[in-house]
Image (tube, rainbow, N blue to C red):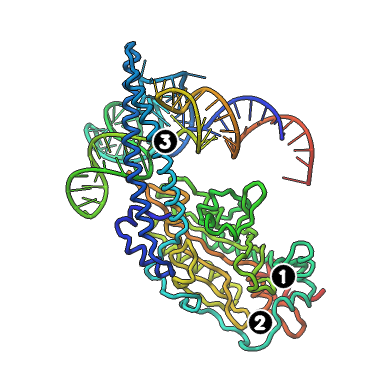
Amino acid sequence: MHDLKALRDNPEYYDKSWARRGLSPQTPAILALDESRRSLQTELQALQSRRNEASKEIGAVKSKGGDAQGLMDEVATLKDKMASLEEQERKVAEELTDLLSSIPNLLADDTPDGASEDDNVEVRRHGEPKNPNASVPDHVEIGEALGMLDFETAAKVAGTRFVIEKAGIARLERALAQFMLDTHTMEHGYTEINPPLLVNDDVMYGTTQLPKFRDDQFGTTDGRWLIPTAEVVLTNMVREEILEEGDFPIRVCAYTPCFRKEAGSAGKDTRGMIRQHQFYKVEMVSIVKPEDSEAEHQRMTECAENILKKLELPFRTIVLCGGDIGFASRKTYDLEVWVPSQNKYREISSCSNCGDIQSRRMKTRFKRAGAKDTEFVHTLNGSGVAVGRALVAVMENYYDPQDGGIFVPNVLKPYMGGIEKIVKG
RNA sequence: GGAACGGUGGCCGAGUGGCUUAAGGCAACGGUUUGCUAAACCGUCAUACGGUUGGAAACUCCGUAUCGAGGGUUCGAAUCCCUCCCGUUCCGCCA
């Protein structure tokens, strides 16, 4: 949702920002609806005011035993007029809400311009790919040769875009998740949450999955949704609350499965584990005061980077341009990890500052000490990191061509019973 | 799945058709008193929206809506009726 008052004061600012996402001017339609709604509301309120007044008079007259028929007739006439105005007002208000909730967030001033992912800007790199341009087997080959990845059986029981992991690789993924959670909770100050994986409509609206991205979601027969990311639950934990200054910063993280239809990605990344209907992710969410969100965004991105550093995986950090950034985000850093078989960097984390667009939808506000009014909080979310893709990266970057095994990264050894290498067993 | 009881402001909680402008309390904020803290006393204190005066803004004044949601009855609904949602407890089933 957007701040209608601010938009009214400065529509050019909004259209300019949205234009950087490739949108045509939206404010003329918004302002027209807004104006129409306000004039209907003003008219309606005048009638309501008279109705209330007349009702009081009727009460007074009747209590003295007088005849209030004239007043009662007047109210009856008013009610006819009100019914049609109410209907019109309801319709216009709904149109306005629908329109506003389908328009993405404003961009941060330092989000770069650009039309597509080709215009994203690299901000830093860490680590060096071991043998760039060398032809190496991908994780599918590696995993199947080890007998530890089984896409065929997964397809038999669930369909495409699922996998069955076994033995050492199953344990490796579990180790990755444990390591990430421990790092975020013990070193980065995040509180571990084990949340519900099914949520209701309001929650999905709050973090902007609804109404626009309904087709990407798995719904249940009883009207709930499988979470596409833990962000949805973690962020909505503070929905409809009025927080105090002392509550900030709120930092929570969770390790959950994520479910996505990948409706718009037909034919993309069909091989392997890069893009699945179900995958694990460790997610970080921060809730902060507006003036702190930029610094928190840097901090969160560094927390995600720290995971890859500890895993000793080569990666780069990019900032997404206006044409590639997500709906709810003002500014997004993506972390891309080196994938040897593809000879390129692939997204493994996305850290976004959502400003107040989610908090407006969730009605999450806070009150400053001594202040009378409430303000909307800022929300941020970031993967820390996508566990399934981290598994792919470890398998390929730690692959041993000598025997087809996978070396265990140092930080994972404690979680793998101290073994050095995953080999065919 | 069945039954009972519930859902009222930041929180607790009263309220069975007009005297509610939602009592009272807690918390918070401002003030008085005070060596400091505490206490006492006085005052302020829901949210959203519209109009209005002035404006950079805070804000002033008037109004409307909101007591889980949506309908209905009524001149008038937190209150009565209907439907739905959610919570708690008990029973049944179940890991």
Quarter of the picture containing the N terminus of chain A is: bottom left
Q: Nearer the viewer, residue A270 or A364?
A: A270
CA neighbours of label 1 inside 10 A, class few (<14), some (14 to 19), many (20+): few
As drawn, the label of residue A380 is none
Q: Chain of mark 3?
A: A
Q: Residue at x 76, y 65 (%)?
A: A154
Q: Residue at x 40, y 68 (%)?
A: A19
Q: Position of residue A116 (x, y in %)?
A: 49, 75
- Seen in the image, is A411 located left or right of residue B28? right
Of badges 2 and 3, nearer the viewer stands 3
As drawn, the label of residue A341 is 2
Alpha carbon separation for disc pair 1 and 2: 27 Å
**Residue A10 sits above or below residue A302 on the image:** above
CA neighbours of label 2 inside 10 A, class few (<14), some (14 to 19), many (20+): some
Label 3, on which residue?
Answer: A83
Q: Nearer the viewer, residue A159 or B72?
A: B72
Label 1's element?
loop
Alpha carbon separation for disc pair 3 and 1: 74 Å
As drawn, the label of residue A418 is 1
Q: Position of residue A82 (x, y in %)?
A: 38, 35
**Residue B5 sits above or below residue A355 on the image:** above
